[in-house]
Image (cartoon, rainbow, N blue to C red):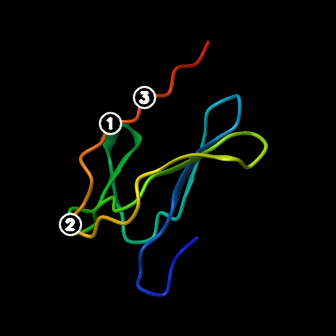
Amino acid sequence: MSEADGSSEIIIKGSSVHVQFNADGYTSEPGGKHDNKNKRITKIVVVDENGNEKCNSGDTPSGLKWTVTVTTK
């Protein structure tokens, strides 16, 4: 979902791997990677299957330096 300021959410959800995002403003690179060096991740929110919030980083306008690892079987 794009915001009025041109930002958008990247959503990883489900018991299988499902990545949802608005590709507008991103350059497609080999290997299925999308990049926009002018964008920063400024907030990370994690919710469970019932919609209960488990983690909320809060807003960080300067950008976050997190690594999120999703493991599948």
- In the picture, residue 30 is in which quadrant? top left
Circles 2 and 1, Cβ within 8 Å, touching? The answer is no
The amino acid type, in three-letter code, at marker 3 is Thr
Mark 2 to mark 3 CA distance (whole Å): 22 Å
**Place of residue 3 in the rendered image (x, y in percent of width and height, measured from the top left):** 51, 80
Q: Is residue 46 above or below residue 73?
A: below
Q: Which residue is mark 3?
A: 69
Q: Which residue is mark 1?
A: 67
**Place of residue 66 in the rendered image (x, y in percent of width and height, measured from the top left):** 30, 42
The amino acid type, in three-letter code, at marker 1 is Thr
Q: Residue at x 49, y 87 (%)?
A: 4
Please report whichever mark, 2 or 1, sits nearer to the chain's N-terminal start.
2
Please report whichever mark, 2 or 3, sits nearer to the chain's N-terminal start.
2
Q: Residue at x 27, y 70 (%)?
A: 61
Q: Secondary structure at mark 3?
A: loop
Which quarter of the figure is the N terminus placed in? bottom right
Could you tell whether 51 is left or right of 31 in the image? right
Q: Is residue 5 above or below residue 69?
A: below
Q: Label 3: how many residues lie within 10 Å, few (<14), some (14-19) or many (20+)? A: few
- Residue 62's disc is 2
The amino acid type, in three-letter code, at marker 2 is Ser
**Place of residue 15 in the rendered image (x, y in percent of width and height, measured from the top left):** 71, 29
Mark 3 to mark 1 CA distance (whole Å): 6 Å
